[in-house]
Amino acid sequence: PEHIPTHAAVVVIGAGQAGLAVAYHLRRRGLTPGDDLLVLDANPGAGGAWRHRWPGLTLGGTHRLHDLPGMTDTGLTFTEADPHRPARELVAEYYGAYEDHHDLRVVRPARVTAVRRDGDGYVVECAPGSPVTAVRARVVVSATGTWNRPRLPLVDGREEFSGLQITTADYTDPAPFVGLRVAVVGGGTSALTFLDEVGDVAQDLHWYTRRVPLFHDEEEELTAERGRIAVGIQDEAARAGRPLPSIVAVTGLPRSPLVRRLEGKDRLRREPMFASLDATGAVTADGEHVDLDAIIWATGFRPDLTHLQPLGVVNEVGGIVVEDGRVPDEPGLFLAGYGPQASTISSNRAARVTALTIARLLAGPQA
Ligand code: FAD
């Protein structure tokens, strides 16, 4: 087996879009894989969280995936890929080709369990069974995404409910819901997908959201503007160390082909969030009982920061102060793909700046 170093100038945790983009820019700045740069990823293969998305999510069904930086010379691009193919397959192939092309040598499956301070750097510890147990690093880039931490709202009686409960991260296909009375909770694109796929096979379907969903037909310019406002709100929360707010609450939902299909099927009959759950279903704010066999929680995700707990930078509300991808209290710690960087386009842009800052830090104060 290939030798895996136990020291590196920079350790990148996570090989999704955010981690790969930072690794690419660090390579361009002269860092070599191995001695200078080590990318660790918990998954057994390439693709980041996209490996785990449901098979029915095609490339054409995503909000648009932006190409990684430095991919044009390989001829691979999401723009020209088959929109009917499952995104999980395409992204895994694409990221795999990217890792090879730029010689990123991602070490996997290596789940990082803890990052601890060690002199002027850090020790990055991995779960037992990983190809490497601990790596010492001067700089750590945490790019772990959100997929491992689905957000569940606090609802009285959730443990009492005896039916099936899954989150977006568990969903694969509608088969388990055939003939059931199903509630879909949440106001984002994932919830809409479940209304479509599960709604076709369920005996009864309810859609609960906290806010009234906002659909809009509009010019691309206005959509982009809404996106910028949402990113600004994320950035403000990140700088203040607050938990990150929902993006869809700000951007609303574009009237996509999926939305139009749901309108055609008369499936967009949203009900206000229920007040509590019991063994056999939900109780509405008016005290009415709704019988349910299954609940799908499509209620978003939180950033996965568990491994940063030993550094004491994660506060009691689960927030972390992040300014321009950096943790001010911890000069060697960077967060990629966090908050305002949590889309394929914004993580690409931020990666260049992060790599430049890291290169300067490694060069020392004279640089
Ligand atoms: P991820 O892709 O989640 O990658 C994180 C990587 O870190 C994973 O490989 C994971 O295994 C690894 N990891 C996690 N914890 C550890 C650990 N402790 N140790 C080691 N490795 C670890 N964005 C768009 O731009 N367009 C879209 O259409 C779009 N659709 C989306 C649909 C859904 C259902 C969801 C949930 C999100 C969507 N997003 C979309 C947002 C999307 O997730 C991001 O754009 C982007 O792909 C996230 O990249 P990332 O690198 O931050 O995270």
Image: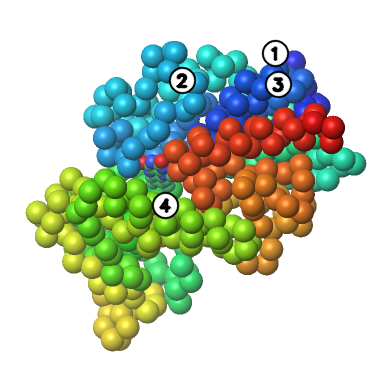
| Residue density around tag 3, few if under 14, some if 14–19, many if 20 or more, within 10 Å | some
Q: Is residue 253 above or below residue 54?
A: below
Mark in front: 1 vs 4: 4
User: Is 4 positioned to the left or the right of 283 in the image?
Assistant: right
Q: Which of 218 and 274 is in front in this view?
A: 218
Mark in front: 3 vs 4: 4
Question: Residue beneath label 1, please?
Answer: 1
What kind of element bears circle 3? loop
Farthest-out residue, right = 119
What mark, if any, has residue 228 been given in the picture?
4
Farthest-out residue, front = 366
In the picture, the quarter occupied by the N terminus is: top right
Residue type marked 3? Leu
Q: Quadrant of residue 13?
A: top right
Mark in front: 4 vs 2: 4
Residue 52 shows in the view: no
Residue type marked 4? Arg
What mark, if any, has residue 71 been given in the picture?
2
Dot 1 or dot 3: first in sequence order is 1
Dot 4 or dot 2: first in sequence order is 2
